[in-house]
Amino acid sequence: MKVAIVSPYAVDQPGGVQDQVIEISLRLAGHGIESWVVAPGRSGPPGARLVGKALIVPANGSRAPIAVNPLILRRVAEAVEGADVVHLHEPLVPLVGWGLLRNVSIPTIGTFHSDPSTLVRSVYRRLGPIARRLVRGLAGATAVSEVAASAVRPFRSDLKIIPNALDVEQYRGDLDKNPLRLVFLGRDEPRKGLDVLLSAWPEIMRRVPDAALDVIGAARAEIRGVRFHGRVEGSEKRSILGRASVFVAPNLGGESFGITLLEGMAAGCAVVASDLPAFQAVGGDAVEFFPRGDVGELTNKVTNLLLDEGRRVGTAEAGMRRSEIYDWTTVLPAYIDMYQSALCGP
C-alpha cells in the first residue's frame, strides 16, 4: 500500500497538525507501508513533495501558514499521484483540501483537527451544500476529538474519533525532577495563556520563593525566576520537561485536543490546566483543572502542588498512566485500518 499524507499547513512552520502528519508518515514504514508527505513549504521531511510557499493568515486566535495560490490545486493533484490512499488533514482548509476533494479520484481519508471558531462554524453553515458534498466524498472521516468533530458531524455522522498521538517512551527517559520547577510549553500567542501564568508568577514566588519556571516556545525580556528558552524541539524539549515537576497549561481557548498537555503528562509532570473541554477530555481525572483565565485559582493549584509532595507525585503518576492510551502503538493501527477499508471500498 502507498499512502500520501497531506497537510494544508506548511511543514517548514511549527504546528501540531504538521507534527502529526510527519510522524504518521515516518511510522508507516515500520508497518511495511510506503508513504510521503504532501504540503506547502520550502523544506520538509525526507521524501516530501512540496507544492509551493505558504501565506501566513490569522485563524482561530493563531496564525496559519496556508497555500492560497490557485496553482496549488494542480500541484497537489500531481503530488499524490501513485498513492493508493490519500490521508488528508484538515480537509476544508484552503486550498490544498479543496483541490484534492474536487479533482482527485484516489480514495481519501479526512482528519479534522481544529476547534472551529464561531466564524468558521458560520462559514460551514453558509457553505453547507458545498461543504457537505466535499466531506461526503471522503472514503472515511476522523477527528482528533469530539471538540474537533462537533462542527463536522452535521455533514458526516459516521465520523470516527482517532486522537493525536505521542511516542510516550521518548518522554520517560531519566527523569531528574526538581520539585520546585514549573514548565510552560506553547507558542507565544494570547490564546496559549502565557500572560495568565506570568500574572500569577509573582504570587507563586512569594509563597514558594525557590520556585523556578521554564518557558518553552517564547522569548521575552528577563523575569526573575523565569527562563525563556524560545523554540526548542526534540531531545532538548524533552530534557526541559523531564526536569520540571509541574506542567502548566493556562490556555484560553481554541484548542481541540491538547498535545502539549499530553507531553507534560508523559514526561512525568503533575499537570495544572485550564478547564477547556478538549483538555478535560485528554487529562480526565489525572489533571488539576482551574477556570480559564482565573489567575487566583491557577496560583492556588500550582502552589498546592509545589508544597505537597504526595499530591504532586500522585498527580504525576496518574498523568503518566493516562498518557499511555495516546501512544502511537495504539493510534497508528486505527489509521491503518481506515486506509485498508478505504482501499477495499464500500
Image (spheres, rainbow, N blue to C red):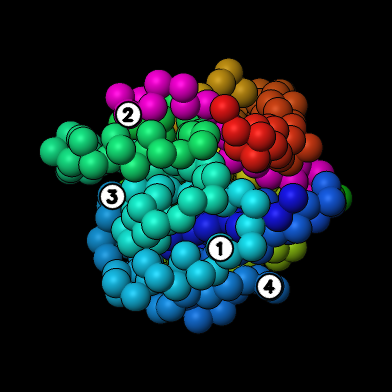
* Residue pictured at 54% horizontal, 69% vertical: 79
- Secondary structure under the numbered disc 4 in the rendered image: loop
The answer to whether residue 336 is above or below residue 199 is above
Q: Answer with mark 1 or mark 2, whichever residue precedes in sequence.
A: 1
Q: Answer with mark 4 or mark 3, whichever residue precedes in sequence.
A: 4
Q: What mark, if any, has residue 155 been given in the picture?
A: 2
Give 331 or 180, whichever is nearer the viewer: 331
* Residue pictured at 51% horizontal, 70% vertical: 78
For disc 3, the marked residue is 60
Q: Answer with mark 2 or mark 3, whichever residue precedes in sequence.
A: 3
The stretch in magenta equals 153-171
Q: Are marks 2 and 3 in contact (CB under 8 Å)?
A: no
The answer to whether residue 182 is above or below residue 220 is above
1 vs 2, front mark: 1
Q: Do the residues labelled 2 and 4 touch (CB within 8 Å)?
A: no
Q: Determine crowd level at label 4: few under 14, some 14-19, many 20+ residues with C-alpha closer than 10 A.
A: few
- Secondary structure under the numbered disc 2 in the rendered image: loop
Give 175 or 225, whichever is nearer the viewer: 175
For disc 1, the marked residue is 80
